Image (tube, rainbow, N blue to C red):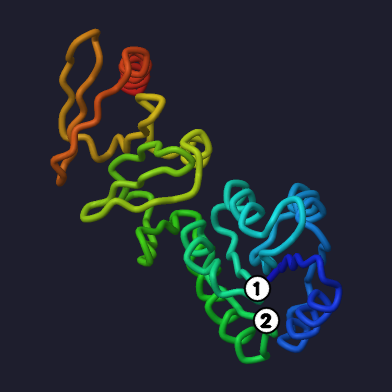
Amino acid sequence: MKVLIVDDEKLALSRLKRLLNEENILDICECNSSIEALKEVAKQSFNIAFLDISMPNIDGLELANTLLQMNPNIYIVFQTAYEEHAIQAFEIGGMDYLLKPISKESIQRSLNKAQKYINLTDNSKKLIAKRGNKIYLIDIDDIFYIKADLDEVIIKIKNADAYLRKKIGDMENLLKGKNFFRVHRSYIINIDKIKSMQSVEQSKLEISFEGIDDIVTSSKDGAKEFREYLEKRSL
């Protein structure tokens, strides 16, 4: 388990490292600022990040947002002396919120939750997505389509829409080699879930799916590229 800890207060950083060491967490990278942390994350990946919120230049909330864009499966733990940031912290994608001074018991609870989360995300066929406070462990084969939504994507499964903090271009790269195709700048579809396709205006395609009522409309270029893709597959 690789852990990143970020705090501009040296004493707080030292205390957190000591508590983690007592739990046999030894692979720790210490950073005194968000800028230093971003440099480290560009060089190596981490399972967990413990982030102070009140830091100069780039605060912990902004840092978390950037880290989750770089690695949506990183487990973010906020550590702060203030309660008022909790709602925003969880909305950004934080998984835990610890109030200083941090106790041994709170660290143990947080690490136990983090380990369960890491075990779930360790399977390359699974995605972790959220809707409100509910977390979904999604098998890639169960996805019908993916839709861009600002700095997130909406993942459509049988009975839910779940959200993942990832750009749709990143999802396209993640799903390369699997049976998915980007038919629109905002949509990626699961080819195995297609029920039927119908040509509409400007040679676009209306795509319906087995098991749900949703319809995805391709772009004109997306329809052309998808038809060419299907023709090559049939040869």
Q: Nearer the viewer, residue 41 or 91?
A: 91
**How many residues crowd around disc 1 within 10 Å: few (fewer than 14), some, or many (20 or more)?**
many
Q: For residue 5, what is the image quadrant?
A: bottom right
What's the residue type where badge 2 is placed?
Answer: Lys
Mark sitting on residue 79: 1
Image quadrant occupied by the C terminus: top left
**Residue that carries the numbered disc 2 in the rendered image:** 100
Q: Nearer the viewer, residue 31 or 60?
A: 60
Furthest toward the top, the residue is: 202
Residue 78 lies, in percent from the top left, at 62, 69
Q: Are marks 1 and 2 in contact (CB under 8 Å)?
A: yes
> From the viewer's perspective, is residue 42 above or below residue 102?
above
Image quadrant occupied by the N terminus: bottom right
Residue 160 lies, in percent from the top left, at 25, 54
Q: Nearer the viewer, residue 205 or 107?
A: 107
What's the residue type where badge 1 is placed?
Answer: Gln
Task: Identify the residue at horizontal 23%, vertical 19% (top origin).
Answer: 205
User: Who comes first in sequence, dot 1 or dot 2?
Assistant: 1
Q: Nearer the viewer, residue 234 or 215?
A: 215
> From the viewer's perspective, is residue 231 above or below residue 128?
above
Q: Please indicate whether residue 16 sits to the left or right of residue 110 in the image.
A: right
Q: Please indicate whether residue 77 sits to the left or right of residue 21 in the image.
A: left
Q: Please indicate whether residue 230 sits to the left or right of residue 43 in the image.
A: left
Circle 1 sits in a helix, a strand or a loop, which is it? strand
> Cα distance, mark 1 to mark 2?
7 Å
Task: Identify the residue at horizontal 61%, vertical 74% (top origin).
Answer: 82
Residue 40 lies, in percent from the top left, at 79, 53
Q: For residue 46, what is the image quadrant?
A: bottom right
Circle 2 sits in a helix, a strand or a loop, which is it? loop
